[in-house]
């Protein structure tokens, strides 16, 4: 019972960190830059912002599939998969939204024993790393700093959101 509660808490923390923080930050970045900046390489050999975002999406999509079907296996990793598939800014925004929302739904539908904590933790860490790259590049390109922490995308707000959701779930389980 305690393990299930801890597992549910881990799933919620992961979901909200990914969907309520990283997705929001990525979308904010994409909305602030020009379509040209999205696919422009600042220097030779460096991945453009759009390619990094597509890499994040590919990783999110793979993990969504694993959550939906834990037996899913992939032939190869995606460590070096940074596709340069120029698309409109609106299309990329839609793909980010679709991928992260599908992940959130898959996490909500997964059962404590139907996921690998290792895989999910890696996804959170991986997404954080590459989201940081995107944020840094966008801030540098547009010459301004995002104020995510001041806008409520911080640990205190995340903790409050999770604790509230856990209390609601606990109340529903007690009522049934």
Image: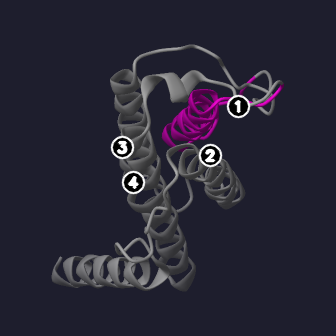
Q: Which residue is mark 3?
A: 101
For the C terminus, give its image quadrant.
bottom left
| Membership of 128 in magenta stretch | no
Return the residue nearer the eye: 161 or 71: 161
Q: Which residue is mark 1?
A: 42
Say which label, 4 or 2, has the lower sequence index.
4
Name the residue rendered at 49%, 64% in the picture. Answer: 17
Residue mark closest to the camera, 4 vs 1: 1
Asked which secondary structure carries label 3, the reply is helix
Say which label, 4 or 1, has the lower sequence index.
4
**Label 1: how many Cα within 10 Å (few below 14, some 14–19, many 20+):** few
Alpha carbon of mark 4 to alpha carbon of mark 2: how far? 16 Å
Determine whether label 1 and label 2 are within 8 Å by CB: yes
Is 85 above or below relative to 156? above
Q: Which residue is mark 2?
A: 137
Q: Tell me the magenta residue range.
A: 45-74
Asked which quadrant contains residue 85, the reply is top right
Asked which quadrant contains residue 95, the reply is top left
Return the residue nearer the eye: 115 or 145: 145
Is 80 above or below relative to 2? above
Locate residue 69, reporting x and y percent: 54, 36
């Amino acid at each position: 019972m305690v393990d299930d509660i801890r597992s549910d808490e881990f799933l919620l923390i992961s979901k909200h960190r990914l969907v309520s923080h990283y997705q929001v930050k990525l979308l904010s970045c994409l909305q602030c830059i020009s379509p040209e900046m999205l696919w422009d390489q600042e220097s030779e050999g460096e991945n453009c912002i759009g390619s990094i975002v597509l890499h994040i999406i590919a990783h999110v999509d793979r993990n969504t599939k694993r959550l939906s079907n834990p037996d899913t296996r992939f032939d190869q990793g995606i460590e070096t998969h940074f596709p340069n598939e120029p698309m409109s800014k609106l299309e990329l925004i839609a793909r980010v939204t679709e991928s992260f929302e599908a992940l959130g739904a898959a996490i909500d539908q997964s059962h404590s024993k139907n996921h690998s904590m290792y895989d999910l933790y890696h996804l959170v860490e991986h997404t954080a790393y590459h989201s940081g790259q995107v944020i840094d590049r966008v801030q540098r390109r547009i010459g301004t700093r995002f104020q995510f922490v001041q806008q409520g995308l911080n640990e205190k707000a995340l903790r409050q959101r999770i604790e509230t959701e856990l209390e609601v779930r606990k109340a529903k389980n007690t009522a049934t």
